[in-house]
Image: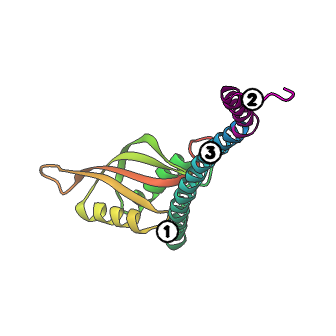
């Protein structure tokens, strides 16, 4: 191109070529980097929201655990600590309390556990015979004594000609662990 002026078309073509090279060499990589950083920012925002949800959930769990600790401190111990004897201890406690009230235990049946992470609830259904006063004494002893026991169901049936009642009682207690085995 010695000595000849560039035509206007050639000048525009050369200008477009320089702009294209600038876009491919500079702007395109910068736009790709911007898109990658935006995707990373969105991923980090998702992680942050998940962790905030976990923190909020852990605060609720911590409060629940503190409440359970306060209850067990105030009322005594829970029925069993991470062993297989939770149901056996609950049954023995019921037999002992019924014996103290002179109630006769006819049958006793283990009900299914209910998980309440990190604890579980164990339950027993029993059929007993005794007077109103004996039954009232048993329920009072179970609900106010140690370990903490909840009477979940109570059925009373009078027997004609006697002062005895047929009592069906379901009780539940809290145990550590999520199952019978450690």
Image quadrant where one finds the C terminus: top right
Which residue is the site of mark 1? Answer: 71
Sequence-wise first label, 1 or 3: 3
Query: Is residue 49 positioned above or below 9 on the image?
Result: below
Sequence-wise first label, 2 or 3: 2
Is 54 left, or right, of 126 in this rendering?
A: right
Q: Name the image quarter holding residue 112.
A: top left
Count the numbered circles shown: 3
Image quadrant where one finds the N terminus: top right
Residue density around tag 2, few if under 14, some if 14–19, many if 20 or more, within 10 Å? few
Residue 182 shows in the view? no
Residue depicted at 70% across the width and 31% down the height: 11
Which residue is the site of mark 2? Answer: 6
Which residue is the site of mark 3? Answer: 38
Residue depicted at 48% across the width and 56% down the height: 93
- Determine whether the residue tagged by mark 1 lies in a helix, strand or loop: helix
- Determine whether the residue tagged by mark 2 lies in a helix, strand or loop: loop
Prevailing secondary structure of the magenta residues: helix
Q: Of circles 1 and 3, which is in front?
A: 3
Q: Of circles 2 and 3, which is in front?
A: 2
Residue density around tag 1, few if under 14, some if 14–19, many if 20 or more, within 10 Å? some
Sequence-wise first label, 2 or 1: 2
Query: Is residue 48 positioned above or below 136 on the image?
Result: above
Residue depicted at 74% across the width and 32% down the height: 21
């Amino acid at each position: 191109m010695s000595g000849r002026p560039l035509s206007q078309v050639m000048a525009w073509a050369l200008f477009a070529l320089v702009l294209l090279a600038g876009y491919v060499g500079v702007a395109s990589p910068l736009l790709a980097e911007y898109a990658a950083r935006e995707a990373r920012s969105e991923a980090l925002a998702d992680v942050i929201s998940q962790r905030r949800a976990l923190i909020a959930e852990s605060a609720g769990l911590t409060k629940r655990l503190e409440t359970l600790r306060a209850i067990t401190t105030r009322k005594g111990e829970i029925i069993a600590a991470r062993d297989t004897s939770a149901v056996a201890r609950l049954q023995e406690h019921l037999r002992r309390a019924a014996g103290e009230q002179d109630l006769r235990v006819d049958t006793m049946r283990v009900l299914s556990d209910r998980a309440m992470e990190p604890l579980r609830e164990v339950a027993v259904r029993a059929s007993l015979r005794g007077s109103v006063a004996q039954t009232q004494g048993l329920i009072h002893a179970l609900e106010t004594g140690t370990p903490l026991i909840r009477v979940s169901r109570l059925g009373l049936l009078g027997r004609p000609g006697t002062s005895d009642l047929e009592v069906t009682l379901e009780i539940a207690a809290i145990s550590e662990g999520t199952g019978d085995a450690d």
